Image: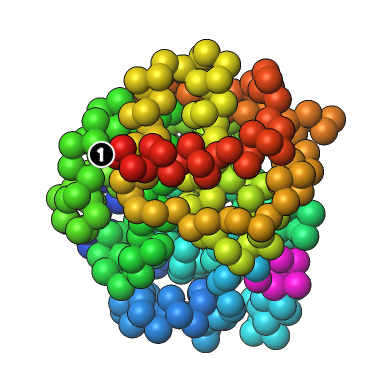
Amino acid sequence: MQTFTVRSESGAYPVVCGRDALRRLLPLLSGLKDTTGVFVVSSRRVWSHCGPRVAAGLRGVRMARPILFDDAESAKNLETVGRICRELTRAGADRRCVIVAVGGGVVGDVAGFVAASYLRGVRLVHVPTTLVAQVDSAIGGKTGVNLPEGKNLVGAFYPPLCAIADPQLLTTLPERQFRSALYEVIKYGVIGDVQLFQFLERDLSAVLRRDPKALDWIIRRCVRAKAAVVSKDEKESGLRQILNFGHTFGHALETATKYRRLLHGEAVGWGMLTATFASLAMRRLSERDALRIAELILRVGPLPGWGGVEAGHILECMKSDKKAHAGRVRWVVPRRVGKVEWGIELAPPLTPAAIHEIPELVSAIGERA
């Protein structure tokens, strides 16, 4: 078990990482002497699998009945936030309560935004139960929900008291969700961790079969990287933008498909491929490194297709992305494995014709990988 510290404007907080990390939850909450109640926010699916273990970890604290909601990406909206806030009100939650978010990225984003908004802010603890949440979304204080016009357009930076990443909560994670998270793990290798990237090239099969040692190692590696970046740039004014590698195109693809066709990590996988091809076309990236990145992404498994989606619609969605400036799209592009640049405008710009070529390039590389 290992603890990483994330620094924020409102104070530092720990990310406890490792098997049996869930045991830290009870001492943490018991140490908050002024707490008037603990309110778990989760989904029915997650709570059916992880609820008994989490409830056991909360034994001895005053806990209300869990508030459960649909954790599909399509339900990550203001309507869901309003419903949860009303349930908290009816349950008697006051400013000294603690919200414990138990679930994946959608649960963390929604519960985090609820915690930031309800009574102008109540305390929050993250217990991520998916790989993508443990390595990425539960760390860093980003919360938010989607609008039909774009992904995560309403939200707040709101750091938790603590995040607890216990790999034992991943045992019931569906295969597709597990694989989807690996695209975010690859992201960390490309943006700054050559050793992680090389480990994945060499031992991806061990990760895919969820070997405990391999899984523990990659989680710790990603948590350490995210904690370091966020501590240097909490509000995404500079360095933290590197964490958006793959997200410019990926978020637009999620929006264009109405959050129903691809999982977030799968969309990021497509986004990383697109940014890699763009960097290669601009001669910012060598062909060798472009192939290494693309082949590793494709070795995770076949990415779901997005045929039938208008390329022009994807481009319009990119202009609505929260990272765009005055409608001008800025990208994170790789320079080599382990180094990226942010704030880059593509030259030549991405066009509908270029978007149509992406699946063909992926198919050609996939046959080689």
Q: Is residue 41 left or right of residue 345?
A: left
Q: Is residue 369 left or right of residue 270?
A: left
Query: Where residue 57 appears, x then y in whole percent?
Result: 32, 73
Specify the quadrant of the image occupied by residue 365: top left
Q: Is residue 19 left or right of residue 89?
A: left
Kindly state the secondary structure of the residue where label 1 is placed.
Answer: helix
Give the tally of numbered discs: 1
Q: Residue at x 18, y 42 (%)?
A: 203
Q: Residue at x 49, y 29 (%)?
A: 276
Quadrant housing the C terminus: top left
Magenta span: chief secondary structure: helix
Query: Where residue 359 appears, x then y in whole percent?
Result: 52, 44
**Which region shows up in magenta?**
75-81
Above or below — where is 103 with respect to 207?
Answer: below
Specify the quadrant of the image occupied by residue 194: top left
Q: Which residue is mark 1?
A: 200
